[in-house]
Image (tube, grey):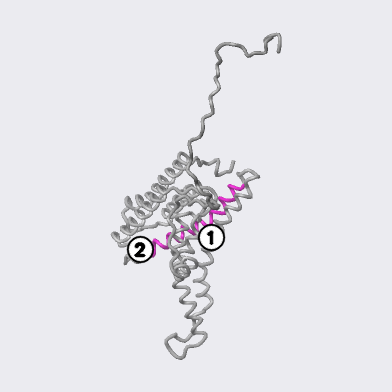
C-alpha cells in the first residue's frame, strides 16, 4: 500500500501489454538418441590443378631432372609474389618475335651459312645477356641497399640471396665445360669401343653422359629462364625485372652499335633491328610497371621498402 494507491490494487484502465497465455509446442515425433560424430574436415578451396604423382621414374625426373631443377633454381618463388599472366604472355610473344626476326635476318642476308649457325649465335647472345645481368646485379643490389630504410636492409639481403644463388648455380654449371677441357680429362684415353671395359672407361662414360644429358640441358634451359626472369629478381620486388631488362636491352644495343654487329645488312634495316629490340622491351616494361601500379598497387616506393 502507498499514498499513490491506498487500496493496494493495480491501476484501472487499458493495459498496454496484455499477458499472453502460454502456447504449447506442437507434438514432436520421438527421435532416438544419435551417437556422437566428431566434426568432419571441410574440403579445401579449389586451387590450381596438381599434376598426378606418376610413377617412380616420373617423380625422380621431377626431383632431380635438369629442366625441373632449372625451373626451381631460376624461377622466382617468394611467398605472396605477384605473377601477372598477361605480362608473361606478352613477354613470350615479344621474345618469339625477336628470335624469329633475328633468324630471318641472318638467313635472308647470309649472315650465317646455315640456320643452325644463326641459332647458335642467338644462344651466344642469350649467354652474353646472362653474363651482363650477373655483372650488374650486385651493383643494383648495392644501390638498393643504400637507398632502403635501415629496418628493411636485412630483408633486402635475404631476398637478394636467392638471386645470387641462381647466378652461382649458372656459373658452376657452365664452368664444367672449360674445366673438363683444361684438365685434359679425355686426352690420351683409349676409345670406349676398343679393348676391354675398365674402371677408367666407366668413369669417362659416366662423366660424358652426365654432361650431355644433365649439365647441357640445365645450362641451355637455365640461360633462357635466367634472362626471362632476370635471375629471379622479382624475389626482391616485382618492379626490379622490368627495370633491369630495359637497362639490359639498351646496353646490348649500344654494344651492337659500337662493335659493328650485323655487318652486311643494309644500314636502315641494321639500325631498325638494333633499335627495335630495346624499343619493344621498353614498351613491354613500361606497360608491366603500369599494370603493377594500377592493378596490384606496386610502385617504386615498395622497391625501396619505404
The stretch drawn in magenta includes residue 154:
no
Residue in the foreground of this view, choosing between 56 and 262: 56
Where residue 33 appears, as percent x and y from the top left, is 53, 49
Q: Main secondary structure of the magenta part?
A: helix
Residue at the image point whose x is 43% and y is 62% from the top:
52
Residue in the foreground of this view, choosing between 48 and 93: 48
Where residue 66 appears, as percent x and y from the top left, is 47, 67
Q: Which residues are magenta?
A: 118-145
Position of the N terminus by quadrant? top right
Spatial distance from mark 2 to mark 1, Cα to Cα? 26 Å
* Number of residues whose C-alpha sits closer than 10 Å to that of mark 2, classed few (under 14), some (14–19) or many (20 or more): many
The residue labelled by disc 2 is 118
The residue labelled by disc 1 is 167
Position of the C terminus by quadrant? top right
Residue at the image point whose x is 48% and y is 54% from the top:
230
Mark 2 or mark 1, whichever is nearer to me: 1
Amino acid at each position: 500500500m502507498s499514498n499513490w494507491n491506498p487500496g493496494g490494487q493495480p491501476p484501472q484502465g487499458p493495459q498496454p501489454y496484455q499477458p499472453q497465455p502460454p502456447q504449447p509446442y506442437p507434438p514432436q515425433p520421438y527421435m532416438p538418441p544419435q551417437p556422437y560424430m566428431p566434426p568432419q574436415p571441410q574440403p579445401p578451396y579449389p586451387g590450381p590443378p596438381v599434376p598426378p604423382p606418376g610413377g617412380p621414374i616420373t617423380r625422380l625426373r621431377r626431383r632431380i631432372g635438369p629442366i625441373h631443377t632449372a625451373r626451381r633454381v631460376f624461377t622466382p618463388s617468394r611467398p605472396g609474389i605477384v605473377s601477372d599472366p598477361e605480362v608473361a604472355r606478352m613477354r613470350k610473344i615479344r621474345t618469339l618475335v625477336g628470335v624469329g626476326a633475328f633468324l630471318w635476318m641472318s638467313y635472308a642476308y647470309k649472315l650465317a651459312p646455315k640456320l643452325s649457325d644463326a641459332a647458335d649465335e642467338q644462344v651466344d647472345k642469350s649467354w652474353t645477356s646472362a653474363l651482363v645481368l650477373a655483372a650488374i646485379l650486385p651493383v643494383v643490389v648495392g644501390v638498393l641497399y643504400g637507398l632502403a630504410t635501415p629496418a628493411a636492409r636485412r630483408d633486402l639481403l635475404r631476398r637478394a640471396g636467392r638471386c645470387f644463388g641462381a647466378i652461382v648455380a649458372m656459373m658452376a654449371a657452365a664452368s664444367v665445360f672449360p674445366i673438363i677441357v683444361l684438365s685434359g680429362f679425355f686426352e690420351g684415353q683409349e676409345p670406349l669401343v676398343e679393348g676391354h671395359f675398365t674402371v677408367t672407361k666407366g668413369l669417362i662414360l659416366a662423366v660424358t653422359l652426365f654432361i650431355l644429358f644433365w649439365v647441357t640441358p640445365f645450362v641451355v634451359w637455365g640461360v633462357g629462364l635466367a634472362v626471362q626472369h632476370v635471375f629471379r629478381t622479382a624475389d626482391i620486388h616485382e618492379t626490379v625485372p622490368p627495370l633491369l631488362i630495359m637497362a639490359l636491352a639498351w646496353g646490348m644495343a649500344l654494344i651492337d652499335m659500337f662493335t659493328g654487329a650485323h655487318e652486311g645488312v643494309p644500314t636502315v634495316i641494321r639500325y631498325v633491328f638494333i633499335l627495335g629490340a630495346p624499343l619493344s622491351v621498353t614498351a613491354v616494361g613500361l606497360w608491366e610497371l603500369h599494370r603493377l601500379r594500377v592493378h596490384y598497387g606496386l610502385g617504386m616506393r615498395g622497391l625501396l621498402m619505404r
